Image: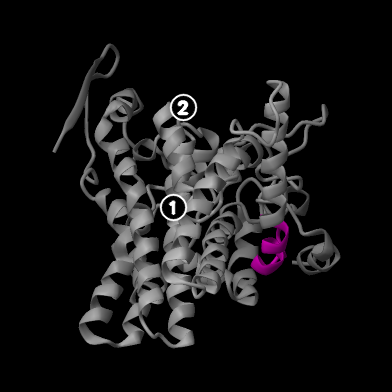
Amino acid sequence: MITYSIEDAQKGPITYSDRKRYLWLISVIMPTFPLMGVFIFYQTGLEWTLCLPLIINYTILPVLDWLVGSDENNPPEELVPQLEADTYYRFLTYITVPLHFVVLIALAYVVGTNDLSWWAILVTAIIAGGYSGLGINTAHELGHKQTAIEQLLAKITLAVPAYGHFCVEHNGGHHVLVATPDDPASARLGESIYGFTLREIPGTFARGWNLEKSRLQKQGKKTWSRHNNILQSYCLSALLQGGLIYSFGWVMLPFLAVHNFWAWFQLTSANYIEHYGLLREKQENGRYERCQPHHSWNANYIMSNLALFHLERHSDHHANPIRRYQSLRNFADIPELPNGYYGMYMLAYFPWLWYRVMDHRVLALPHINGDLSKVNIAPQKRAEILARYDSD
């Protein structure tokens, strides 16, 4: 175990050891879980074994979050520079990148070379998409960093789920307007995940394209050119997915269509739960207040954070976007989700249950305290919500 240390003039010697240092390897291993189902399928010939990764994600992981519990500890701020300078942590994100390609190609091979039933093809496509959705998470961690290698690896990773506009849109759009009515990637109170999907996916694509178009125009470059960061990633997607169609035939068309949508839907699911109902105040000058930790839903659950490069410490991430995953902090009195992301995804897929669990949590937050003027409310549900909760 590596110990970081510093002699502070006021506090004296300060030391810190990351007890999860080697457990972060779970974030590297997580994208390969579908290979377990593939291995068991080839050993047994039983199609249902291809479903095992879905069972792990949506039942076992939420239960483990509940059983193992949370970690609210933070590294000492004085030692964060040393922690962030440790190349071990960024190496883990680097080696995860090729694994996303391996898993998609492996699952495409299973579908393309076996006489599977229609439901097995559908399930395998959903599993492939779910784990390619993890590629967006890997690109998320890489794309916020300011080194050329990490920016490049983010674009390469986004080729797997065919979501090349993500980093441009996320960094230049979502982080600017998060927790406001102007952000298509921030969910509103009373908005179902399905209604949010119809607003978020096309809205973020359009915003990402417009941001990149504007950047290139300022540099005097054409939008449709090799300088377009979005097109660079989508060209890799075309090569990858075109190669799969060429290698395994036309069955790849429905397989990849489901794969792509479900990968995108994983990001949509994360965006939905991360800012549901939260609202930044609009100031007299027309600008929104600076994003604070209480403008994002946080989760400190150990297991799912270890599987997602600490994505669930989302409050600190939005307040300090370039901070690396191993250094993200917990804060007092911030919105806390009642389970990790996969448990919350399942809850969100049943809107009536989501509203029952989450709406009162939004209103009970210390900075809201039942004041609906401080909540981001779905316009089409505003009258209904005001009538329901103003009388509470």
Instruction: Residue 146: give its label.
Output: 2
Q: Is residue 189 above or below residue 144?
A: below
Residue range of the region highlighted in magenta in the rendering: 187-199
Instruction: Residue 16: give its label.
Output: none
Question: Of the residues under marks 2 and 1, which one precedes in the sequence?
Answer: 1
Q: Quadrant of residue 85?
A: top left
Q: Residue at x 51, y 34 (%)?
A: 321
Give residue 294's position: percent from left, percent from top: 58, 43
Q: Residue furthest right?
A: 383
Under tag 2, what secondary structure? Answer: loop
- Residue 191 shown in magenta: yes
Please give left or right for residue 113 compared with residue 203 in the image: left
Q: Nearer the viewer, residue 248 or 78?
A: 248
Q: Residue at x 32, y 34 (%)?
A: 75
Res. 280 visible in picture: no
Under tag 1, what secondary structure? Answer: helix
- Residue 233 shown in magenta: no
Please give left or right for residue 29 compared with residue 122 in the image: left
Q: Residue furthest left?
A: 1
Q: Is residue 30 above or below residue 39?
A: above
Mark 1 = which residue? 135
